[in-house]
Amino acid sequence: MPSAQFRFYSELNDFLPRYKRYKYNHLTFNGRQTVKHLIESIGVPHTEVDLILVNGKSDDFSYLVQNGDVISVYPIFESFDISAENKLRSEPLREPKFVLDTHLGRLAAYLRLLGFDTLYHNDYVDQVLAEISYKEKRICLTRDRGLLKRNLITHGYCLRSTDSRQQVKEVLRRFDLFRITKPFQRCVRCNGMLENVKKEEIVDQIMPQTRRYYDEFKRCTECGQIYWKGSHFQRMTCFIESVLAEETRGISSS
């Protein structure tokens, strides 16, 4: 039976059993198998992979693995250029947009708070998520490896953390987004854009105490939700500052 050696680099090892991490492992296979199929059979979603070297030369997902091949698999490179090699995605998503799996509602709110276009509904099924990701060129965020193995999804990420506050930091690090955040530009409820609105236009929609103490307001252009700089604003500001401080910590520790 033919076999090949596979080695996965960096965070791709998160998907492997501990005894298989950071080393070459033999994999036997039957018949004609693409490198994409074998990579995913090991447990690594194709959306996590951006470079494949077969016997030292770059190749794509359609390569048919041969007996004795030595295959190195690398994750997405966001921080430096590998354009001289054969990257597996035809084009990067330089204006990141997201679609989130059904269990990631709090993460969706955090990403919207930071200004990122983020679609989320708690009743999306996997096929709908895959179609949205493909048709709208959105990065699919999930903890479901099976979802990311769908062929329609070309840009996606499997979250490692189960804590929503850690997840948002993880996403910013993964896609190098710290410097392009635009807080308080989107509605955290529906993802619509916010616009300034005059107090007299919404005076009948806010509580007496709010009318008394606040004069500056924003309103969602989609759902009409009204925002002002109350105590919730201070809490959100502190949260944003703590998230963005991760970039400085990451630089200092590197």
Image: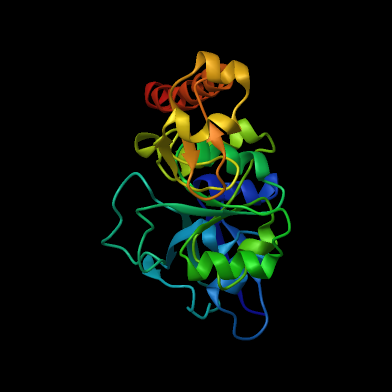
Q: Nearer the viewer, residue 182 or 60?
A: 182
- Judge from the rendering whether residue 226 lies leftward or rightward of residue 1; answer left or right: left
**In this rendering, is residue 91 above or below 241?**
below
Rendered image quadrant of residue 148: bottom right
Q: What residue do we see at 26% from left, 62% from top?
A: 84
Q: What residue do we see at 67% from left, 46% from top?
A: 104
Q: Residue furthest left?
A: 84
Rendered image quadrant of residue 33: bottom right
Res 181 visible: yes
Q: Nearer the viewer, residue 33 or 169?
A: 169
Q: Nearer the viewer, residue 193 or 196?
A: 196
Q: Quadrant of the C terminus?
A: top left
Q: Nearer the viewer, residue 244 or 229?
A: 229
Q: What residue do we see at 46% from left, 21% from top?
A: 241
Q: Quadrant of the N terminus?
A: bottom right
Residue 57 percent across, percent down from the top left? 36, 68
Residue 139 percent across, percent down from the top left? 50, 56
Q: What residue do we see at 53% from left, 22% from top?
A: 233
**In this rendering, is residue 253 above or below 69?**
above
Res 21 visible: no
Q: Residue furthest top?
A: 213
Residue 149 percent across, percent down from the top left? 62, 66
Q: How many marks?
A: 0
